[in-house]
Structures are given as structure tokens and as C-alpha cells.
Amino acid sequence: MTITIALIVLVALSFDFFNGFHDAANSIATVVSTRVLTPRQAVVWAAFFNFAAFLIFGTKVADTISKVVHPGTLTNAGIFAALVGAILWDIVTWILGLPTSSSHALVGGLAGAAVATAGWGTLVASEYQKIFVFIVLSPIVGILLAFTFMTGVYWVFHRYRKVEKLNRGFRRGQLFSAAAFSLGHGGNDAQKTMGVILALLIANGLLAKGSDVPLWVVLSAHAAIALGTLFGGWRIVHTMGSKITKLQPVGGMAAEAAAATAIWGVTLAGIPVSTTHTIAGAIVGVGTTQRLSAVRWGVAGRVVWAWVLTIPGAFVMAWLAYLPFRGLR
Amino acid sequence: MRLSRRSWFFLAMSATCLLLLAPTPEKYRWVNLSMGALSLMWFILLATEEILARRDENRPRAGRSHR
């Protein structure tokens, strides 16, 4: 049994690695597209702050994730299938270059595996309700905060004539906003894997119910997501950094600062939001300060469809992945 | 008076935040309320700016009628 648990922990950390790999684009797309950092420098910068996030955030989001299905429902096979489903969905959307949420893939995967194990009654409706509400709210928060930040910056600096100097300032500012966003990303996303590992350890009697997340789990989850970011997925950088709307350093800074503010707020409140949805919303918010047609709504629409399909897609993949591993102990 | 799609976009976001109040857990409703209010504020500001700009465009400039 110990080998099985170790194997599942390894798969959970692989999911975290893919999460970093898939979502690296969120942290670095704006700094790369505005040429503030080279791609290589940007991933190192983001990975460092992904890891450092364990020093700042607690584990409230991990608690929420560990409660999306009734305790004791998921067997080892179920947890394994949930992770495999989420990883497969991440790989498919990465191939298609779509910035979907790894968090929602995980939630969909857990639901698919739980339903395959013991039916629909195993899902905790109130937790899913919270997650579904924030699927809609998180891009709205991103759009509104980015629009507000961007308009504020225009108001403050509209009489300033030294454009070159101003741009240099915004480029430097982007380093800090990217760091703040990467901290938020590491804080919110690494905790989701911690939640799964916590549920696994409790289900196998290795930890008592209601235990805190052990330090080794916290450190290994942050290390895995940072490593994934280091290997970053370039396909999505292109979609986020230049396809949705064209970004200048000031816009990049406003988008990242807005998304970082939103993610820090919800992470401290224990809400598992999608960092992808928030930053994509913030990029749209920056675009809308020009005019609504500055946003390429065709690309944004494709992204939204991928969001809608993430939970059902990962659900089906996890459900199918469960079938051959039903007997796993 | 026709308003731009951008203004309506902000009103739609405000309405969405308020529509989601019921399914949002009570603990987190401050997010809906604050974002709904912020969005409504932007709708009012953008709509006012557009209305005033159109009124200025339509107003005949001083001295033009004497030419």
C-alpha cells in the first residue's frame, strides 16, 4: 500500500508540475510580450516567486479542495484517476494553446473519479456551487480591477510628456507586478495539489481527520509547480501575450497588478479561483480601456468555451481513467 | 441616446455580479457587491462622458452662424 501511496503522491506532484508548465504563460506572458524580460529570464523569475509563495499563504485553499467530495469516498484508484484526468485535460488544452484552468481540471477530475467510484451523491454541492460562482466572478474581477488600474494610471500620468522615461518606469514596475502575480499563482495553485495529497493521506489513515498540511507536502508542491513553470508552455504565452489584445508595458503592469490583487485576496480568503481566468480577464480589462474592439473577441470567445468545457472534459477523462484501475489498493 | 457597447458591457457585468448574489455563499458576497458597485460606477461614468461629448459635438460653435 505504501508504494501505491508514494506513486499517487508522485502523480499529484506531476499534476503540479503540469500546472506550472501550463500556467507559466499566465505569469510571464505580459512581461515577455512587452519585452521587459527574455523568455528564459521570465520563467526563472516566475518560478522563484512560485516557490517563495509558501512563506506567505496559508493552506485554506487546500482545505477547500480536500472537501469537494465527501470524506472517505475516494479510494486510491479514485484519487489516481482524478489526477490522470486533470493531467490529460491540461495536455490536450496545452496542445491546442488554450489557457484553461488547471484548478478546474482538478475539480472536474475529482468529481469524475468520485462519481465513477460511488455515484453522484458523493459530491459536496455547496463546495461545487462556490467554485462555479467564482468561475464567472474571477474574470469579471480581473476585468474590473485592470480597467480601474489602467484608467487610474492614465489619469495620473496624462500630462506627463517624457514618454520614454515613463515607459522605462512601467517596464520596471512590471517586474514587481509579475513577481506579485507569480506569488499569488504559487499560493493558490500549489495548494490544490496539497489538498489532494492531504485527502490521500487522511483516506489511508496516515494522518488524522482535520490535520494540517504537513510541511514536506507544502514544500514539495511549491517545488513541483516552480519546476513546471521553469519548463514553461510557450504555446499559451502567444495566446495570452499577444492574441487577446496587444499589450504595452503600462498595460502589462496594470493587468498583472490587477490579477495579483484579486488572487492574493481570494487566496487569503480560501477561495480556489482560476489564476488563468483572472489574468485573461485582466488582459481583456486593459484592452477595453482603448475600446471594446481592441479585444479580439473571437480569441476570447474560444478561451471562454475552453473554460466551460474544462470541468466536464476532465470529469469524463477521470471517469474513463478510473475504469482500468478500479482494483488499485 | 445611443450608448457605446463598452458602456453596456460594464452594465452587463454589474448585472451579472448581482444575479450571482443568490448562489454565492454569504461569506463571499462582498465580492459580488463590491464588483457590482465598481462596474455600475464605470457604466455611469462612461455613459456620462459619452452623453456630454455628443452634446458638445452637436452644439454649434460660437461665431460660426455670423460667417
Image (cartoon, rainbow, N blue to C red):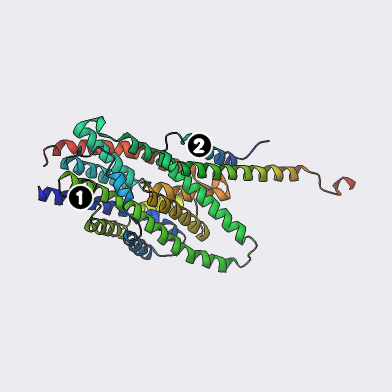
Q: Write the residue at 54% across / 65% down.
A: A167
Mark seen at residue A11: 1
Q: Position of residue A225 (x, y in %)?
A: 29, 56
Residue A35 can be seen in this image: no
Q: Amino acid at mark 2?
A: Leu
Which residue is disc 2 drawn over?
B18
Query: Which chain does the residue under circle 2 lie in?
Result: B
Q: Position of residue B51 (x, y in %)?
A: 69, 42
Q: Are marks 2 and 1 on the same chain?
A: no
Q: Quadrant of the C terminus of chain A?
A: top left
Characterize the local packing of mark 1: few (<14), some (14-19) or many (20 or more) Cα atoms within 10 angstroms: some
Q: Write the residue at 17% across / 40% down.
A: A75
Q: Write the residue at 14% across / 52% down.
A: A6
Q: Nearer the viewer, residue A300 or A17?
A: A17
Q: Does residue A183 lie above or below A204 as drawn?
A: below
Query: Which chain does the residue under circle 1 lie in?
Result: A
The reply, left or right, for residue A186 in relation to residue A286 is: left
Callout 2: SS: helix
